[in-house]
Image (cartoon, rainbow, N blue to C red):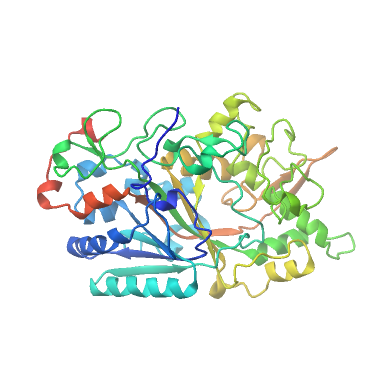
Amino acid sequence: MAVKLDLDDIQGLIARGYRTLPHARFTIFAAHDAADGHALLSWLLPRITPAGRFAGNSALHLAYTADGLRRLGLAEGVIAGFSPQFIEGMTGPNRSRFLGDVGESDPHYWAWGGPQDPPVDGLILLYANSPEVLDAKQAELARQLDGLALRQITVLDTLKLGNNEPFGFHDGISQPIIQGLPRASSAASAVTPGGRVVPAGEFVLGYPNAYGQLTSRPLLPAAGDPRRLLPRDPAGSGAADLGRNGCYLVMRQLEQDVAGFWRYAGQATRRPDGSGDPGARTALAAKMVGRWPSGAPLVETPDRDDPRLGDHNDFGYYRTDPLGLACPVGAHIRRVNPRDSLDPQPGTEASLAVNDGHRLLRRGRSYGPGDGAPTAAGNDSHTERTARADVTPQHETGLHFICLAASLIRQFEFVQHTWLNNPTFHGLYDDTDPLIGSRDPRGATFTVPARPVRRRYRDLPQFVRTRGGAYFFLPGVSALRYLDQLSADVSSVPFPSSVTR
């Protein structure tokens, strides 16, 4: 059934990743009181970029934590309608262990967002087509924050957007196609793994999800919205729908040990005489990722990189590589997007439908000392650039991971816990994700299926460490208008549990 999205009410980050705006900066802030928070929101509102009207040299988006919504005066009865994971936060009791944020990734070591750090209220995402425009827009924002005595907890710089992530692999290839957006109407197929259209409700609240249902979201009695700023519940309850056209935003600062990754691949593939084997090193790294540095998938070209397939995404696993002989079953891309390999009926529409319920819309940007330019994958110059000895804590390299979803528990947290950090994923024994998985207390093995005997690489170091993070809500434009006009009278309206749940 066709779905019509209200693109003028949806923030544009849901619709596009801003490849034409390759420069970005993210400001994480806290307000001292409600007045300052409302003043900032009033200033930002006309600058928000909706999905339906994008033009110009920059874009701006705004998201709030549960604490930030409270600061604006949103009633606890309404906040109770958000998911428990959002309300509890990323560092809530037992959540860090569930997400694999243990050991060196423990929130107590984070640069921001940890339990010892100032509480985070909101996130401002700024994108621009040039460094000059970005600096000018950021300076304007900083003056506004300073004038309101708002605290900039941290300002996260990013590299110029390129094709490659810091480990040197082509990234951003496999993104879900969202029903109701222009790209969906031109998708080659709705049933193949690469061209599949995913229901809009998997990413935008207030629309049917992969199960044909409306994901739980905060509703409030019509009396709580006397100016009718909010859309009404599409289920017909008459309630004002604060969640519609919004989504959850996961933000995690992930430090990548680029030198350590390539060093391990090199040491694990040394020849019997102790000399290095650059080709074997790149091949092992590709096995861990599931794609060659150019982006070519191993299921299509298992023995060598083929840049002609660098953007190829229309493939499955069950019929072409069920045992993982080409692309190991524990490789990163098979974990984060298993495609057609899931039960109950691998290789069928039913398997793809299960996968639809766990997709993530990724909007991250890399950071670090580089220039963001693509590397010459697999050759000596690539090795020199990606295995540098000068990648130290003073010159951190990594990813400001951002993903959008309608369900934190079923999408982000499921993928993180059940697929990426699961040592027994797909019948394995002691293998977490070889690229980004936690090694504490298990998971330091990478298994490469082969005939006649599999190969197991042991003692994998921790290549990625969490350095900050928080859960945010990215509201629709109408919801931002509602939050902007909140007053004591509005926020004191009672919210019975039968309406808010």
**Residue farthest left in this picture:** 489
The image shows residue 263 at horizontal and vertical percentages of 72, 64
Residue shown at the point (69%, 70%) measured from the top left: 385
Q: Quadrant of residue 329?
A: top right
Q: Nearest the camera: 18 or 108?
A: 18
- Quadrant where the C terminus sits is top left
The image shows residue 276 at horizontal and vertical percentages of 83, 64
The image shows residue 388 at horizontal and vertical percentages of 68, 72
Residue shown at the point (44%, 55%) measured from the top left: 251
- Quadrant where the N terminus sits is top left
In the image, is 167 to the left or to the right of 356?
right
In the image, is 426 to the left or to the right of 300?
left
In the image, is 17 to the left or to the right of 137?
right
Q: Nearest the camera: 185 or 374?
A: 185
The image shows residue 14 at horizontal and vertical percentages of 44, 48
- Does the rendering let one see residue 117? no
Q: Quadrant of residue 108?
A: bottom left
In the image, is 5 to the left or to the right of 380?
left
